[in-house]
Amino acid sequence: MQKHLRTYNHPSKFFKKRTYTFRTFITDIIKTMKHREYIRDAHRSQRISKQFSEHIMLVVTGINGCIYCEWGHTSFALQAGSTLKEVKALLSQQFGEFPPDEELALTFAQHYAESAGQPSKEAIRRLLEHYGLEKGRDILVFCEMITLGNLLGNSISAFFSRLDGIPPEHGSFLFELTVFLFGGFLFDRYMNQGR
């Protein structure tokens, strides 16, 4: 792994980013399997442009703090036509200069991440009312998928942090080790998928 990808801040004695345990990972995998038809449809339909989907994923990533997803999705967003200024704004939840049609989706993505993937029924209702069922569902799918990637990436970072003597507050060493051992291949494939 590249050394610059292994940097993280430790404001306390615990690694503070959200990570997976076996149980929470299995829960999200089951949810993903139930939604696999929606996931395929969201990617194939192009109701949400590549640039717009990257904006959504960068907002979630900015809150979850995954250094791997930040690196990969910054690259994908730039390839899709976003500027570096826009990427920085998305990662810091500054949506003022984005098209009005994106604003609700970006604030929903922020709420989705801040609520640990448990958005309020009112937020979901407003999302679907504004964008319609299919496009709103696509936005939800992009939030769910990037959260899965973020928490896997954070689990790898937690493994390195644990080795440095700063374990996650609610982590699982065995899960972190498993993700580290198998994650290198998967993250490499994921990072290179947009090229």
Image (cartoon, rainbow, N blue to C red):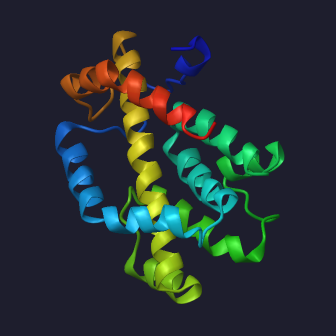
Task: Indicate the position of residue 178 as horizontal and vertical percent values.
Answer: 24, 24
Count of picture labels: 0
Task: Identify the residue shown where x is 53% and y is 77%.
Answer: 135
Task: Indicate the position of residue 80 as horizontal and vertical percent values.
Answer: 73, 51
* Extreme residue toward the bottom, this view: 129
Task: Indicate the position of residue 116 as horizontal and vertical percent values.
Answer: 38, 55
* Extreme residue toward the front, this view: 44
- Residue 16 appears in view: no
Task: Identify the residue shown where x is 80% and y is 43%.
Answer: 84
Q: Quadrant of residue 160?
A: top left
Task: Identify the residue shown where x is 40% and y is 74%.
Answer: 120
Q: Is residue 181 left or right of residue 73?
A: left
Query: Of 96 and 148, which appears nearest the observer?
Result: 148
Task: Identify the residue shown where x is 48% and y is 80%.
Answer: 134
Task: Indicate the position of residue 87 as horizontal and vertical percent values.
Answer: 73, 47
Q: Is residue 179 left or right of residue 97?
A: left
Picture quarter with the C terminus: top right
Query: Compared to 6, does 31 lie above or below?
Result: below
- Residue 26 appears in view: yes
Query: Compared to 163, does 150 lie above or below?
Result: below
Q: Is residue 50 left or right of residue 138?
A: right
